[in-house]
Amino acid sequence: MILRRLRARTSTGAIAAALVALAALAACDTSSDSATNGAGACSTQAPGVTAASIKIGLIYPDTGAPEIASAFKASRSGVEARIDLQNARGGVNGREIDLVWGDDQSDAETFSTVAHDLVDTQRAFGLIATSIVLDKSAGWLEKENIPVTGTGTSATWSNHPNLFHAGNLFNTGGTSVFGDFVKAQGGSKALVVVDPNVAASRSLAMQFVPSLQKRGIQIV
């Protein structure tokens, strides 16, 4: 499968564009005939792809914990703006992009329910996930070979070939970049604030702390 051979990294502002590119690969091959004749001559068996449209699903926390919902508030409008731009340019190989969305409420079980609805019922080709609760659904999404783009909010985002992100602060192995920055600013002590109810907060703290300590920054 194409997705087994692709490893992509996109900028945060191009999350939707990454899935558009993957949809283009699925929607039509790159032969001269298909390029010349357009969508009418380009058939595909990919889910969510018809002769006239490509359906893409968006999952984000529209409601739920206020502090999380507010952090992702602009996600939907940003994705819609990028897709509107693509559709104004003719879509993907002549197919209009049809965006459907669901609210995961920052809850892992709700994310799973929404993902199954978008993939199984609404037959979306792929997903855009700006969410902190994808982890429990990652194995199923890989098994179903569903391309997913979004924000890397856990190490899981780097462990599956069907998940595409701009860069992941949660990768295992650690990094010195946070400590380097604080030290360069003249800092010697740091206070790390963690929300115990949010897994992403705890995971990010586990990256911050050793990074700071490696550069001699005292955690208070």
Image (spheres, helix red, strand yellow):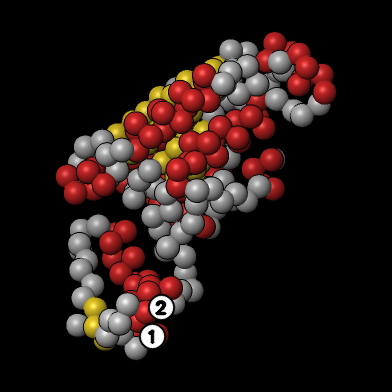
Q: Which residue is mark 1?
A: 215
Q: CA distance from mark 1 to mark 2?
A: 7 Å
Q: Which residue is mark 2?
A: 180
Mark 1 and mark 2 in contact? Answer it, CB < 8 Å: yes
Residue 86 point in image, percent of width and height: 53, 25
Q: Is residue 53 left or right of residue 37?
A: left
Q: Quadrant of residue 109?
A: top left
Amino acid type, mark 2:
Asp
Query: Residue furthest toward the bottom?
Result: 216
Residue 119 point in image, percent of width and height: 47, 30
Query: Residue furthest toward the left?
Result: 66
Q: Quadrant of the C terminus?
A: bottom left
Query: Residue furthest toward the right?
Result: 32
Q: Is residue 114 left or right of residue 91?
A: left
Is the residue marked by circle 2 packed among few (<14), some (14-19), or many (20+) residues within 10 Å? some
Label number found at residue 138: none
Q: Earlier in the sequence, mark 1 or mark 2?
A: 2
- Residue beneath the point at 65% across and 21% down: 93
Is the residue marked by circle 1 packed among few (<14), some (14-19), or many (20+) residues within 10 Å? some
- Residue beneath the point at 64% across and 29% down: 24
Q: State whether residue 89 appears in this view.
A: yes
- Residue beneath the point at 49% across and 56% down: 167
Residue 211 point in image, percent of width and height: 39, 78
- Residue beneath the point at 52% across and 19% down: 88
Amino acid type, mark 1:
Arg
- Secondary structure of residue under mark 1: loop
Instruction: Give the vertical position of 149 relative to 57 (above or below).
Output: below
Instruction: Give the vertical position of 209 relative to 93 (above or below).
Output: below
Instruction: Give the vertical position of 169 relative to 109 (above or below).
Output: below
Residue 124 point in image, percent of width and height: 49, 27
